[in-house]
Amino acid sequence: MDQTKLLSRLLPTVLFIVFVAFVLFLLPRVEAITLDYIGGMFARSVTSEMFVGSLRSFAAYLFPVLKIIFWMSLVIAIVRLLTMVILATVLRSVAQSEIVSLTRTVVSVLIYITAFFVIFQSHFPNVELAAIFTGSTIVGIVVGLALQDTLGNFFSGVALQADHPFQVGDVISVSNRATGVVESVTWRGIKIRTFQDKLVIISNSVVGKEVIEVAPKDNLNARLVFFNTEYGFSPSRTAKLVREAVRNVPNVSGLKRPIVRVRNLGDNGLDWEVKYWCEDYRRHNDTDALIRQTIWY
């Protein structure tokens, strides 16, 4: 992220933090003035004592609630500001952007929950939050059961991101599911673009249970192409001619020499295999077809 874009994102957050801090500075003074005014209403015989008492009770709860809201807004803004700065500086070289984003989200939520407990208890010390959360245990169980699949995908996504078995651009084959190029990896699932140009979305909980074959995009991945010849052709001459022809096919890596060898002695001739290495494994189907065509001619 360049400096101009970073500053354009940081400036509104900084202005919001300054505004909230200014409001928090004024709130105690506004609260004192308001309570004094309400107390003076009865002294001036403007209204009844019961009405004044109700107003004071309302104000006594209103201002702490407003303080909690503004304090939480301040905490959220500061956390977002820090995460933006950290991601733009310290974590710029981290390749696993998904796990960085996931870690940022989890840490932020933990900070928000802790801050809420501290702020709430400081303004309402007589309210037992533990009792409130204990009373909602049944609701939590119901919600947990309802979110079972979502939580399964979440934790499977954490495991995948931590292990990082593949990345965007790799060709993967998920057994009995799909084969194609990885387009995105999130905490919910992976998107695979098949070689028929279809988009397959597989949840992380399913991926975690399957066998995955990975062809990394920055690796020389090998392929096998098969053909056969009659017994009348010289094996050594056939291997030499095919090897030289395959080396000139586009997308065949020149860093490794193609291997041409007899795979089997068939009933009507020799069965051969050609092993070559792809520069771009995403184009291996076209390369296989071109090699077969080259061998034929």
Image (cartoon, helix red, strand yellow):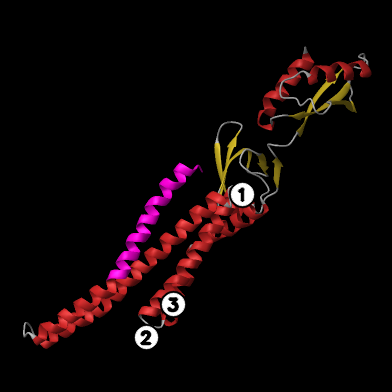
Q: Which mark is residue 126?
A: 2
169 left or right of 261 in image? left
Q: Quadrant of residue 43?
A: bottom left
The three-letter code of the residue at mark 2 reads: Asn
Residue drawn at x 44%, y 61% as measured from the top left: 78
| Residue drawn at (36%, 79%) of the image | 123
Q: Nearer the viewer, mark 3 or mark 2?
A: 2
Residue 75, above or below 166: below
The span shown in magenta is 1-26
Q: What residue sits 41% from the left and 46% below the top?
A: 8
Report how far apart the C-alphas of labels 3 and 2 lie in the structure: 15 Å
Q: In this view, does 49 lie to the left or right of 90?
A: left
Does dot 2 land on a helix, a strand or a loop?
Answer: loop
The span from disc 1 to disc 3 (Cα, nearest Å) is 36 Å
Residue 4 included in the magenta stretch of the image: yes
Residue at the disc numbered 1: 96
Residue 151 part of the magenta segment: no
Q: Quadrant of the C terminus?
A: top right
Q: Which of marks 1 and 3 is nearer the N terminus?
A: 1
Contact check, label 3 and label 2, Cβ < 8 Å = no
> Which residue does the numbered mark 3 point to in the structure image?
133
Could you tell me how far apart the alpha carbons at marks 1 and 2 are, in whole angstroms?
45 Å
What secondary structure do most residues of the magenta stretch adopt?
A: helix
Where's residue 263, x and y in %?
88, 29
Going from the N terminus, do you reach mark 1 or mark 2 first? 1
